[in-house]
Structures are given as C-alpha cells and as structure tokens.
Image: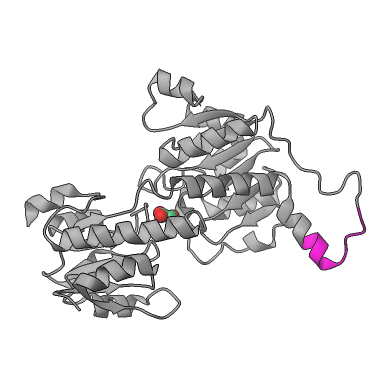
C-alpha cells in the first residue's frame, strides 16, 4: 500500500505488478477481459497514474475523467495509437511505452507467419485434424519457396530491421519503404534496398507491414495497392489493423488477386471483417507479436518503471511525450 492511487486495467505479469504494489495503492481490473469503457471512465477518476493496454481506448474522455491528479499513463505496449497524446501532453501528463524489448519477439512471429502462410502449415493442420487426409500427394498443399524471393517491408524501424535480418537466413531479398531512407552504409550492412511504396507493392512476393498507425499509415494498403500486388504475393500485417483496409483485403482474397494473408492485428480487434474467417488461405493470429514469457515480463517491468518515474515527477525512462513535463 503506497501513497499513489493507480489503476491497472488488466492483470499484467507479476514482475511488474509487484514493483507497482510496493509504492502504490492499486485498483486492478481483475476480470479476464478488457475493461469496459464505462468502468474505465469510473475507475480512472481521481487516480495519480494509469497502467493501460493497447486495447484500452485512452481518449480525451478518459483523461478528463481521471481528473487533475493524473500525472502518468504507462502503456504495456510499444504502440500508443490508443492514447490521445495531444490531450495528455496538453494536460502535462507523461506517457510511457515499452520500445525495444519486443523487437525480437515480434520479428520472430513475423517470420513464423511468413513461413506458415507460404508453406500452408495452418491449412495442413486443419486437413490432418479433419480426418480427411489420405496421405502424401504430389500436388497437395504446395506452397511458396522463399529462397530468391522478395520480401517488401513497410516501416524499417527496429522491428522491420529485425525481420530483414532474419529474412536473409531464408535467402529472401529485402526491399523497403520508410518515411525516412536509411543511410547507405546501414542499408548495405543489413542488406536492404529502398524503393517507393508503389514499387514495393508491385515487386514484393511477401509484403510485411511494420509501421506505426497514424494519419499517414491509415489504410496504407487498400483496394488500389492490393490490385497492384502480384497474384502470387502474400500480405503480412503485425503492425496495427487499420494500416490495412480489411474489407478490401477480404475482397482481394475472394477474387484471388493475391495468394494469401497472415494477420496478427485487425481493424476492429477482436472482431473480424465479415468473410475473413471463411477464407482458407489466411493465417489469423490473436495479436501475439510480443507474446513470449521473457518479453512480456520485461514489458511489465518497463511499464512499472515508467509509471513510478512519472508519479515521482520525473520523466518515464521510455517517454513518448517528454514535452508534457514543461506543462506541469
Ligand atoms: C503490440 O502490438 C505493441 O504495441 O506492444
């Protein structure tokens, strides 16, 4: 029991919760489902700090409901598109996230999706379980080779680079598009080649998304881009659902404009666009990017460290709006 009143919107790994409990009085939303909006609004009231998840809509209404004591929001995620950052900054509330620590786990998952999609592992699993498998057949569930193919990466930040490094081991050539081009020595060291978004979409055999969600990346891949992709190309999204126009993707898959898709994120998580689950050549993961034991434990500890630093009036060690400190 400590001095600060804190809301934690879901059970997080104990390693983080223990640190918070040592110094704070914690109101934990204990149910094993996301906190409903009305509960979030009610329980935020009067808190000094909030630990939230990427599934919690931390808009201006929640920030206002928390009231003037709120000093810090610590999200247990690297992405913070669910938080109204302008409003938090305006009110002098610092926001912390968990960059870096989930890079390797998310890149591992991306490769797992590329491999299972290209080699049709999930379709094969369904066939074997169904009891309809009649044994090895020369043309059964044949998929894609990786060696010599082109992987296109949208967003060559930490995670994109970690994916590119792994892709090399599978003989994939990597091209990328990013808001800012890397310096040539860094490109050569990975190695990757910078192209326009149009070229990336047209040239990729595997098109993998690793950019943050913002106004520029909303529906970055829509009807037009899907039409430009090769008919034998695959789309992989481990970034944020709204980077892809999901209804347009369903349509493109139905029309066989592309060969398949693997998604870890969805436009209206956890809801799926109508028809998506009925399509055979899609792999659908339940937002597992950072879901390894070590990574989630480390994320929880970073979240606690962000929260405690913010409560003490300092900057969270991983702060996305340090300018907020000038306001309080
Ligand atoms: C996962 O999607 C994260 O942003 O941490």
Quadrant of the rendering where the C terminus is positioned: bottom left
Does the magenta run of residues contain 283?
no
Quadrant of the rendering where the N terminus is positioned: bottom left
- Above or below, 292 against 186 in this view is below
Q: Name the quadrant containing residue 82.
A: bottom left
- Above or below, 181 against 31 in this view is above
Q: Give left or right: position of 107 versus 85.
A: right
Q: Give left or right: position of 249 versus 212.
A: right
Identify the residue shown where x is 20% and y is 62%. 308
202 and 67: which is toward the camera? 67
Identify the residue shown where x is 62% and y is 30%. 172
Q: Is residue 19 visible?
A: yes
Q: Name the quadrant containing residue 301.
A: bottom left
122 and 199: which is toward the camera? 122
Q: Name the quadrant containing residue 12.
A: bottom left
Q: How is the image coloured?
A: one colour
Q: Give left or right: position of 215 versus 249.
A: left
| View quadrant of ligand 1 | bottom left
Q: Which residues are magenta?
A: 126-135
Identify the residue shown where x is 71% and y is 52%. 281
Q: Is residue 252 visible?
A: no
Identify the residue shown where x is 66% and y is 53%. 282
Does the magenta run of residues contain 129?
yes
Q: Give left or right: position of 77 versus 199.
A: left
């Amino acid at each position: 029991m400590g001095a600060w009143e804190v809301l934690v919107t879901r059970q997080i790994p104990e390693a983080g919760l223990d640190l918070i409990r040592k110094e704070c009085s914690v109101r934990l939303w204990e149910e094993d489902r996301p906190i409903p909006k009305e509960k979030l609004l009610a329980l935020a009231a009067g808190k000094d700090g909030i630990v939230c998840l990427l599934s919690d809509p931390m808009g201006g209404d929640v920030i206002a409901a928390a009231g003037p004591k709120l000093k810090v929001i610590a999200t247990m995620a690297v992405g913070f598109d669910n938080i109204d950052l302008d409003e938090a900054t305006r009110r002098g509330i610092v926001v912390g996230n968990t960059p870096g620590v989930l890079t390797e786990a998310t890149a591992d998952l991306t490769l797992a999706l590329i491999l299972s999609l290209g080699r049709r592992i999930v379709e094969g699993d369904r066939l074997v379980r169904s009891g309809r498998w009649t044994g090895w057949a020369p043309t059964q569930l044949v998929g894609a080779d990786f060696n010599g193919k082109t992987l296109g990466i949208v967003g060559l930040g930490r995670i994109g680079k970690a994916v590119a490094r792994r892709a090399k081991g599978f003989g994939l050539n990597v091209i990328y598009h990013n808001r800012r081009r890397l310096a040539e020595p860094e490109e050569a060291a990975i190695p990757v080649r910078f192209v326009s978004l149009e070229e990336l979409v047209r040239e990729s055999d595997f098109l993998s998304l690793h950019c943050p969600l913002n106004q520029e990346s909303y529906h970055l891949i829509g009807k037009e881009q899907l039409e430009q992709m090769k008919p034998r190309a695959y789309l992989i999204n481990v970034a944020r659902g709204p980077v892809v126009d999901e209804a347009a993707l369903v349509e493109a898959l139905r029309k066989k404009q592309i060969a398949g898709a693997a998604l870890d994120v969805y436009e209206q998580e956890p809801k799926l666009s109508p028809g998506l689950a009925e399509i055979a050549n899609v792999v659908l993961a339940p937002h597992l990017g950072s879901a390894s034991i070590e990574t989630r434990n480390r994320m929880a500890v970073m979240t606690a460290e962000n929260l405690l630093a913010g409560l003490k009036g300092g900057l969270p060690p991983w702060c996305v709006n340090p300018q907020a400190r000038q306001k309080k």
